[in-house]
Image: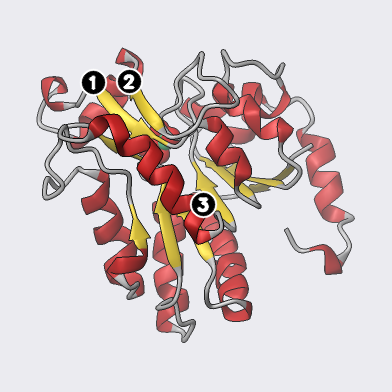
Amino acid sequence: MAEVIVLDTPDDAGRFVAAHIAREVRANPEFTLGVATGSTPLPVYQALHAESEAGTDFTRLTAFALDEYVGLPVEHPESYRSVVDREVTVPLGLDPARVHVPDGSVEGIQTAGARYEAALEANGGVDLQLLGIGRTGHLGFNEPGSSFGSLTRVKTLTERTRIDNARFFDSLDQVPIHCVTQGLGTILRARHLVLLAFGEGKAEALAAAVEGPVSASMPGSAIQLHARVTVVVDRAAASELKFRDYYQWAQDHKPDWQGI
Ligand code: PGA
């Protein structure tokens, strides 16, 4: 079962997760971080920036993004390559050569998934994967129905996800229909999953992912198959969790040596 940590605000969650990552990076500067995009991980990136300013050296970190839109030029401000550069690579001073994002260009799209899997494998996988969850329950862009064994490949976004992401674009028409995303099988290979969710709008999907039946209809429920998962949420996102009193009890009695 996932460890569930409920904190007061997204900023508290960001600082908590960033402090853990910074400790790991100080112990192993060659750490590999799986980065997510969207609004959810931003407090983590802000807090990582503070860790960097306070002296943690991230220059040897390797990063792998979860997904990318198909057909959006990389220089478009909402391509995930641009988002990762803006939110992670530049503020943390990462070596751009160590920052990987799936190739969403239309030319060569048939091999984009296999090339990304090869890059992940050559790197030796991901140490810690940051994850958000969509209101459809998606992890990465693995929409409902995605196989738990799936690898990086082209997927079709649901209309729900396109509408949710239209806030980053001038209009819904500009939101791509296709993406390249790590599969659920790819994500499950990361050595530690850290799932973040904030706000009431995520409460239902979060509860289904953490406590509901394991089903491809709820891609987030794939986390229940992983041996090391930390779910870090605010009170609003936790509001539909049936066992939240128990999660709090477990936190209150957690041995100091355990970490997350
Ligand atoms: P959000 O997206 O962080 O922008 O809400 C999460 C997701 O779609 O996985």
Q: Is residue 126 left or right of residue 165?
A: right
- Badge 2 crowding class, 10 Å Cα cut-off, few under 14, some 14 to 19, many 20 or more, is some
Q: Residue at x 84, y 38 (%)?
A: 246
Q: Residue 177 shows which numbered tag?
A: 1
Residue 127 in sight:
yes
- Distance of mark 3 from mark 2, alpha carbons? 26 Å
Among the 4 quarters of the image, the one containing residue 143: top left
Q: Is residue 41 left or right of residue 252?
A: left
Q: Is residue 3 above or below residue 28?
A: above
- Distance of mark 2 from mark 1, alpha carbons? 6 Å
Q: Is residue 35 above or below residue 106?
A: below
Of pointers 3 and 1, the one earlier in the residue sequence = 3
Q: Identify residue for label 2.
A: 157
Determine the quadrant in which ligand 1 lies.
Answer: top left
Q: Residue at x 55, y 55 (%)?
A: 126
Residue 67's spot in the image, x, y percent? 36, 39
* Residue in front for this viewpoint, 236 or 31: 31
Q: Residue at x 37, y 36 (%)?
A: 113
Mark 2 touching mark 1, by CB under 8 A? yes
Q: Residue 18 shows which numbered tag?
A: none
Q: Identify residue for label 3.
A: 121
The amino acid sitting under disc 3 is: Glu
The amino acid sitting under disc 1 is: Ile
Residue 252's spot in the image, x, y percent? 84, 54
The amino acid sitting under disc 2 is: Leu
Residue 215's spot in the image, x, y percent? 65, 16
